[in-house]
Image (tube, helix red, strand yellow):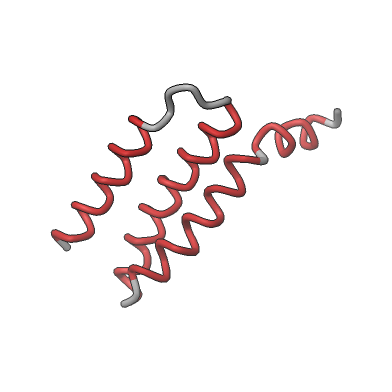
Amino acid sequence: MKRIRIVVLAILLSSTMACGGMTQQEQRALSGGAIGAAGGAIIGAMAGSPGVGAAIGGSVGVATGALWDDIKDRTKGK
């Protein structure tokens, strides 16, 4: 459990420091990936495979973050 906390903290710290000079879409993709990986690692740890959970959660988070404006526009009917 201590390793998961360290990994989550490292991901969050690196994502906040790496956002300088990035576009909004890139920032959303990075943030979504970090949040998804952290959440996936936690859920994966409960299921017995934190690495797989982090990989799946991170992938979904990156895609969602990068496509957020498109998703938001489609739900509003633009």
- Is residue 48 shown above or below 21? below
Residue 19 image point, x, y percent: 43, 28
For residue 66, what is the image quadrant? top right
Q: Going 47% across and 47% down the picture, which residue do you hit? A: 33
Image quadrant holding the C terminus, namely top right
Residue 66 vs residue 39, the one in the foreground:
66
| Residue 42 picture location, percent across and down | 32, 60
Q: Is residue 51 above or below residue 73?
A: below
x, y percent for residue 4: 23, 59
Is 76 on the left-hand or right-hand side of 67? right
Res. 64 image quadrant: top right
Instruction: Give the residue drawn at x 51%, y 32%.
Output: 27
Single out the residue that lies furthest toward the front: 21
Left or right: where 68 falls relative to 59: right
Task: Name the residue at 41% across, 60% down.
Answer: 40
Q: Is residue 24 left or right of residue 30?
A: right
The quadrant of the image that shows the N terminus is bottom left
The x and y percentages for residue 36 are 45, 51
Instruction: Judge from the rendering whether residue 78 lies leftward or rightward of residue 17; answer left or right.
Output: right
Instruction: Give the residue drawn at x 30%, y 69%.
Output: 45
**Residue ranking furthest to the right:** 78
